[in-house]
Amino acid sequence: MSHDDFPTEDPAVVTCGLPYANGDLHIGHLRTYVGGDVFARSLERLGQETAFVSGSDMHGTPVAVNAEQAGVSPEAFALDWHEQYAATFPEFNVAFDNYGHTHDETNTAVTQDLVRDLEAGGHVYEKEIMVAYDPVDDQFLPDRYVEGTCPYCGAHARGDECDEGCQRHLEPGEVEDPVSTISGNPAEYRERTHKFFEVSAFADYLSGFLDRLEGTSNARNQPREWIEQGLQDWCITRDMDWGIDYPGENPQDLVLYVWVDAPIEYVSSTKQYTERVGADVFDWEAAWKAGAAGTTEDHPDGGEIVHVIGRDIIQHHTVFWPAMLEATGHTEPRAVMASGFVTLGGKGFSTSRDRAVWADEYLDEGFHPDPLRYYLATNGGFQQDVDFSWEKFRDRVNTELVGTVGNFLYRSLLFAHRNYDDAPIADATSDEVAARIDEAIADFEAAVNDYSIRAVGDAVTDLARYGNEYIQRNEPWKLVDEDPDEAARVIHDCVAIAKAIAVLFEPIAPEKCERLWDQLGEAGSVHDVTVEAARAEPAGDLAEPDELFEQVEDDRVEELNAKLEDRVAAAEADDEPGADGESDDDTTDDDTTDDDTADDMTDIEPLSDDRISFDQFQELDIRVGRIETAEGIDGADDLLELRVDLGAETRTIVAGLKRLHDADDLPGTKVVVLANMEKAELFGVESNGMVLAAGDEADLLTTYADAGPGTKVR
């Protein structure tokens, strides 16, 4: 692994968090898979040797529970979901080089070998621990069969994770007031012998690793807190039948914890890719075996490993996984890109209430996958939460894909096709346009090295915006008669811009860009070229173009919203949330928030009996403000740094709006601000005021008419 700018001489592996083989995929889940695909394709555009791999996470308690309820074996249950995922991803142009699963022979062998290496290195030991036990049903309870209270924050927690509170990983025996999720019986703790990986011995290494780690800032900052608090060793075995057997002597028939074999699938899937295409195409050992026996002289430090995940599994990828890799002489990750969640119309997805836009539903409605890819990739920074609504989807598609990119491409290529027999139309691209294409390529390269898939899209839309301005400024329709040579030069420039767009936009809209490549009459496939093709003169025989992107009509949005509301109402009327046995946490890489709390007016807090005087109210300096900028704060999941114009001055205010509002939508918004709030420092940013909002959804207070910034609220 290097830390040089991409492309490097070392092979790259891009992975996505494994979808848990336990339920349907919705568009929230697609965010990391689209993001990973965009990043892998972008690396390939730069000329980086890249393998893009993932697989289905087959093991764990929820699979076993739901398989039992379905009356099938866990293997058959999980394989059915695996096959659905393997079929769904290509429908959204997510093109894994290899997509395996954690129960196949390769991953079983690689996992057991790696655990043997951990033991041989002295990093595994046995320990008597307290494991939840149901005395009524006379059975030990694996972690997902247990729920109770988090010992760290007091929130409701699952047996292995505080999923509703601090999101810490929890070891067996840590959950307080345990209850069996199978029977509902109170559980008790009894001693059992289990295997532990000595994570605490790697604290210094992990601190240094986080200093080196690239990607999104949340992936670096969040695990630092756990390391500073003191790492606990990690129980890597479980009392259950479904999973990979612990290798060697195993008198208690323990299986490996699902989070041991899940990330190892990244290695296994890369190995399977090499076995299929040959080491001369991609050498998995050169990528993964830094310092190990398989290391090649050409790649002594291994390859460039980039993990694209949801932020709820940061701890596993930045603490447990790199410690395992270091202990066994494998390549540490170069980067972790941790995405924010996806909400739906400002609220969390709720699978039990059918409040979701399902992956197959999106396609069944007749939408092309590339506009959704564009929306998920470019709607906010990757680590920020993204709010999906059909209205916002319509606006992004109509304004940017149809109005900017599609408009430029169609008008340019149609004019060229109708007025010229073939390309090249002129001898060469003008210096101005060639320089602007070079600028777009530089923006693209910078975006990849900044791990910003949003900026990858911006590089293209900015170029298309320039193209629209260029063609409007030069008016080739007038030049055809007045100055034919100049008209040919202008249109040649436009075709050159179109070719550059086809190359640079391919990672986000691969299918549409292949269609554009055909319209340009270029040889081969756009999927196989690098950014250098964007600089090459257009040389194809232009075909008659069609419009690449389709407008989303207002009545279509109304129809889709009505369908969603009807589904949610039907699910709530049924009054049996989760009756199908499906867990709302239905993927390992769960890029959604689930909100199954019904809107209930009886939950409104009573009015306070404590009164303040008019004089006390007069002491509050409440002003109208206008948000000028809104940006996320490194390490803070909920906070935005706002610059707010208060008339007399512009202040920095930190507000807990990050999960509830799209930061891109906030600039220009009028808000009400408590201006004489005491200053406070939050995550290194001094906050000078408080933005007022109503309710758990942070409904921002504003003004009815045109009160300007600085106006006092009385």
Image (cartoon, helix red, strand yellow):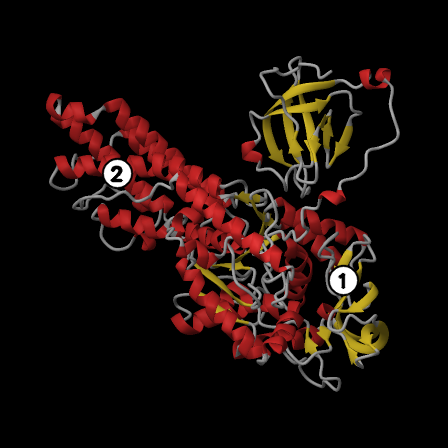
Quarter holding residue 250? bottom right
Q: Quadrant of the N terminus?
A: bottom right
Q: Is 58 left or right of 614, judged from the image as shown? A: left
Q: Is residue 585 above or below residue 434?
A: below
Residue on which the image places disc 2: 410
Which residue is located at x 55 percent, y 25 percent?
A: 668
Q: Residues within 10 Å of mark 1 (few under 14, many from 20)?
A: many
Q: Secondary structure at mark 1?
A: loop
Q: Is residue 493 above or below residue 352?
A: above
Which residue is located at x 80 percent, y 81 percent?
A: 138
Residue 196 spot, x, y in % from top left: 76, 71
Residue on which the image places disc 1: 170
For the question of whether residue 443 can be seen, the reply is no
Identity of the amino acid at label 2?
Answer: Tyr
Identity of the amino acid at label 1?
Answer: Leu
656 vs 168, nearest the viewer: 656
